[in-house]
Image: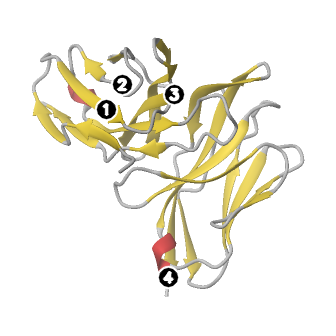
Amino acid sequence: EAQVTQNPRYLITVTGKKLTVTCSQNMNHEYMSWYRQDPGLGLRQIYYSMNVEVTDKGDVPEGYKVSRKEKRNFPLILESPSPNQTSLYFCASSVTGSEPRHEQYFGPGTRLTVT
Amino acid sequence: DAKTTQPPSMDCAEGRAANLPCNHSTISGNEYVYWYRQIHSQGPQYIIHGLKNNETNEMASLIITEDRKSSTLILPHATLRDTAVYYCIVRVATGSSNTGKLIFGQGTTLQVKP
């Protein structure tokens, strides 16, 4: 089944403890992206990747890192999480980042709480 | 970067057309407009996209004004299952090239009522 998977789905952690949220897609998509969703603010893009080894900042990259060493995986790294990073996180992928259609397929979301 | 503005909420009667507006007055000439919707806290779902001309697919129609400063998503016969948050998105372009950077509006919560 074609899908985007995220792990973990739920995570409660403490301030400063490094964590990684994994994202994997099995559709051979070139483009991948991370978003956060907060009440009243909607969805905001954190980072995106047009292809392997190519990453760029989205709207809210501060406090996050990403890497794209393989086409299928795009992990989101929080080196020193803070409470303001408590949010619902979505990973998404698209066949390509350069074509007009750019239909993204989203993962199920990861709900992160930083205390 | 372009900014999108949407009303926070709208109601629509079942079976009637739902017209969801979006303002993107700072959009540049090569920047596409996309619409997605999100039901509950699931991942958003693609609906439609456009650049200058009006577009229609099996889900919806997209009307973009001639000056491209605003657009309207039309669900022609809304059903209860169309109740969702609808996002208007501008895709940033540099020169003539599309980037992967997307600017989301805050979304409109559409409530379809029986």
Q: Chain of mark 1?
A: A
- Please give the name of the residue rendered at 45% of the width and 30% of the height, measured from the top-left corner: A33
Residue located beneath label 4 in the image: B113
Determine if residue A107 is in view. yes
Q: Which numbered circle lies on residue A56?
A: none
* Res. A74 mark: 2
A95, B101: nearer the viewer? A95
Residue matched to label 1: A23
Give the alpha-carbon distance from disc 2 to disc 1, as whole Å.
Answer: 5 Å
**Residue at mark 4: chain:** B
Chain to which the residue tagged by mark 3 belongs: A
The reply to whether callout 2 and callout 1 are in contact (CB within 8 Å) is yes
Quick one: SS at disc 1? strand
Number of the front mark, 1 or 3: 3
- Of residue A12 and residue B36, the one placed in the foreground of this image is B36
Visible residue check, residue B3: no
**Quarter of the image where one finds residue B67:** top right
Find out whether the residues at labels 2 and 4 contact each other: C-beta distance under 8 Å. no
Residue under label 3, please give it: A30
Q: Is residue A72 above or below residue B105?
A: above
